[in-house]
Image (spheres, rainbow, N blue to C red):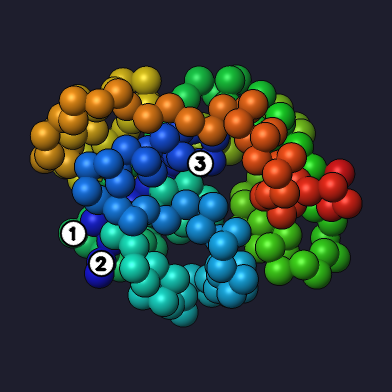
């Protein structure tokens, strides 16, 4: 199995909804951060990839998957686009201020210390937090990194290979880009802040559980 779709959008830009949409369109299974929660070996794979992307074993990481969205893979969209030259790339976006507020209520709510040893937290800090110089609550800085990333994706990926997409746009642009029929079902819209809070209350994700850094 090889990757057919690579998501370049940061977390909290509709990536879970996109994951479910791709799977509904027959382009799954789709990798997402929730897959990392399920595999105890995965955090170390991603940490090692961040240390030296040229040596990352993408075939091992994505075994059994035909698409990937969200972090941690969004950090490596350039490497993945080179490794899977036939794959199409989707950049999910949302209003920058809305995105920042969403991150503060969910994925960036807790800080991660530099000396953390837990594999999942160590991976998060290296693969995601360091993109923002670990200044996760500095609004102007975090938004500037977000906007620069989106701009670089546009500049890096050829236009005929890239879809800049908002989940609110619905099925039509997504299906047109992928060359598949539009389903007669509603576009998935999941992982709201409330749903994220419910997931935390149920015991995950690991860095948001009771007793973890706050």
Which residue corresponds to the image point at 59% horizontal and 74% vertical from the top-left? 41
Cβ–Cβ under 8 Å for marks 1 and 3: no
Q: Nearer the viewer, mark 2 or mark 3?
A: 2
Which numbered disc, 2 or 1, marks the residue that appears first in the sequence? 2
**Tag 3, which secondary structure?**
loop
**Inter-mark Cα distance, 2 to 3:** 22 Å
Report the residue marked by disc 2.
2
Find residue 15 and report its image quarter: top left
Q: Is residue 50 visible?
A: no
Q: Nearer the viewer, residue 7 or 55?
A: 7
**Tag 1, which secondary structure?**
loop
Side (left or right) of 153 relative to 128: left
Residue 26: horizontal and vertical position, in percent? 22, 48
**Inter-mark Cα distance, 1 to 3:** 22 Å
Cβ–Cβ under 8 Å for marks 2 and 1: yes
Side (left or right) of 103 relative to 66: right
Report the residue marked by disc 3.
10
Which numbered disc, 1 or 3, marks the residue that appears first in the sequence? 3
Report the residue marked by disc 1.
86
**Tag 2, which secondary structure?**
loop
Cβ–Cβ under 8 Å for marks 2 and 3: no
Which residue corresponds to the image point at 39% horizontal and 67% vertical from the top-left? 62
Task: Give above or below for 83 relative to 92.
Answer: below
**Inter-mark Cα distance, 2 to 1:** 9 Å
* Number of numbered markers: 3
Which quadrant of the rendered structure holds the C terminus? top right
Q: Nearer the viewer, residue 91 or 15?
A: 15
């Amino acid at each position: 199995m090889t990757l057919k779709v690579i998501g370049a959008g940061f977390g909290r830009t509709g990536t879970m909804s996109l994951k479910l949409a791709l799977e509904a369109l027959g382009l799954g299974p789709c990798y997402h951060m929730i897959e990392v929660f399920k595999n105890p070996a995965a955090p170390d794979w991603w940490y090692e990839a961040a240390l030296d992307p040229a040596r990352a074993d993408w075939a091992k990481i994505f075994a059994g998957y035909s698409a990937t969205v969200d972090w941690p893979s969004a950090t490596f969209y350039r490497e993945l686009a080179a490794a899977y030259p036939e794959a199409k790339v989707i950049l999910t976006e949302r209003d920058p201020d809305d995105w920042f507020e969403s991150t503060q209520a969910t994925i960036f709510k807790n800080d991660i210390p530099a000396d953390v040893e837990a594999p999942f937290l160590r991976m998060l800090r290296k693969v995601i937090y360091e993109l923002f110089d670990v200044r996760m609550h500095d609004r102007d800085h975090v938004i500037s990194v977000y906007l620069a990333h989106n701009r670089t994706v546009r500049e890096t990926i050829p236009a005929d290979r890239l879809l800049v997409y908002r989940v609110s746009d619905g099925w039509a642009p997504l299906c047109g880009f992928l060359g598949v029929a539009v389903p007669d079902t509603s576009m998935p819209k999941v992982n709201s802040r409330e749903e994220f809070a419910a997931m935390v209350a149920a015991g995950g994700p690991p860095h948001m559980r009771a007793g973890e850094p706050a």
